Amino acid sequence: MKHLQTYIISTALILAAILPLHAQEQQTEPVMPGETPKPTKYVAVEEAKEHLVFFQGFTLSADVYAPVAYMVSDYGAAEGALRLNLKNTFFPIIEAGYGKCSKEDFNTKVSYKVNAPYGRVGIDINMLKDKFQSNRLYLGARYGLCMFNYDIAGPAQTDPIWGGSEAFNMKGLSSTSHWAELVFGVEVRIFKNFHMGWSVRYKREISSTKNDRAKPNCIPGYGYTTNDICWGGTYSLIFDLNWGMKKSHKRGGNINLQDIPQKEVNQQETNDNDNGDGTEEGNDDEGQGDDEEDSEAESV
Amino acid sequence: MVLLLMGCYSNNCPLENTVTCNYGFYDSQGTDITYADTITVTTLMPGYKTVYTYRKLGNTTVTKEEQDSALIHQGYTETISEQRNDTILVNKLFNASSMKIPMSYFHDEDTLVFSYQRISLKDTIKIQHTSYPNVELPECGTYRFHTLQSIKHTDAAIDHIEISEPKVNYDGATNIKIYFNGVVE
């Protein structure tokens, strides 16, 4: 069963790694020598940044990895997330789920069961330089919390010297766990507002209430406590809800000059007339400071 | 990546898989010593057992826990008696500076009898404790941990005893320090 789990996980991760690369290839068409570049819409990136509204909508997502994990292993969860989009750069996020673990060791016959809700809060930061493209590569952090009760049962304990036997069955042991996560993730637009993405998470327990009798072996939302640290991951279906946003301000949309205040457009035209070569300052780092771009800007 | 994810599932069971109470030996001044005498530790268990003793003039006395009719046919005289249950926990420990002795799972008090080779007197130690089950990880199995509460002892060869670590588990710490009579020069 573990081999099947390993196969599914590795296939999903490989596919997830390939998808964004394919999407990025489609976006760039190389220009052959001697060929005139096709006219493209000029986006005054710096101006667009200035006019990018602070609140860019929010995102709902569901993790499909955790339920599949439960089907092929002892631990899994049902998990969803609500994420805000601030300037296409900062993404405060709330994740909530219901985790379940039920296992019995083949050799020792000791069983462990836990079912409990959990939550995480944190933030993702889009690390791509171009904040307007639909794909994202982000780093993030989470704080996780779970309050849960767990059961442990096993064969009766028998004293080999003095004799006697006692059933081994502990139910309702309670614990509260706090943990931190570092997140690295990729997100790709598949169709309109529908996205897919994966993340890898480095998790570390901050604290857990200890019980003299039994340590929690698995914490919903965190995973196994066999080691001090744990690795996890998600594969998410993501839906952008850009309710109330202007089309030009939606993710991946271009800024029209009509949306830029007239005062600034006039100022821009003045600058164009002053600079005979038409080069616009501040756009050099975007690699778009050519004459063609200024002429393109007029045609937008 | 998969290896990293699978890292969460590695076995992390304790190296020591038995829970014993660890004793350290010291002289009366607190210097750790190697005790030169031979020590045998037996424990008294609750209840009694029937013992059959067979004697014949000119032969060694034979003691058995079950009746042996063959010895009677050989001319042995059988004596039936009731004795307390006892079990040897440490047999003829020599030149040791420490020892490990298991504790009872379901009794509040363990009685240990220390027998020495050089002196005919014996020491009796009574250890009050509580016990509780413990699971570190399901794959590691279950254990029985103990918490020492108090110790009483006689003073044939023992000067005094102290509890140094009341929690008895598989960590290997010295739980009880036995200070024998005399001082190492």
Image (tube, grey):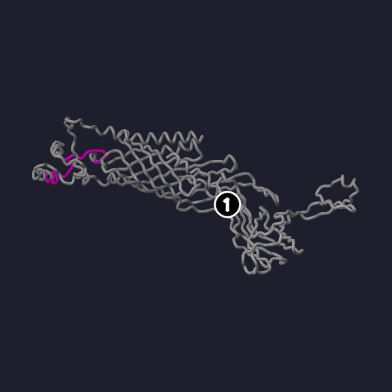
Measured as percent of width and height from the top left, residue B165 is found at: 59, 60
Is B12 a magenta residue? no
Measured as percent of width and height from the top left, residue A20 is found at: 33, 36
Label 1 amino acid? Arg
Q: Is residue A117 visible?
A: no
Relative to residue A268, is residue A9 drawn left or right? right
Q: Which residue sits at x=44%, y=34%?
A: A8
Residue range (magenta): A249-267
Q: Which residue sits at x=71%, y=66%?
A: B157
> Closest to the observer: A4 or A97?
A4
Give the chain letter at badge 1: A
> Closest to the observer: A26 or A70?
A26
Res A134 quadrant in image:
top left
Residue of label 1: A213
Neighbour class for label 1 at 10 Å: few (<14), some, many (≥20)? some
Measured as percent of width and height from the top left, residue B152 is found at: 68, 64
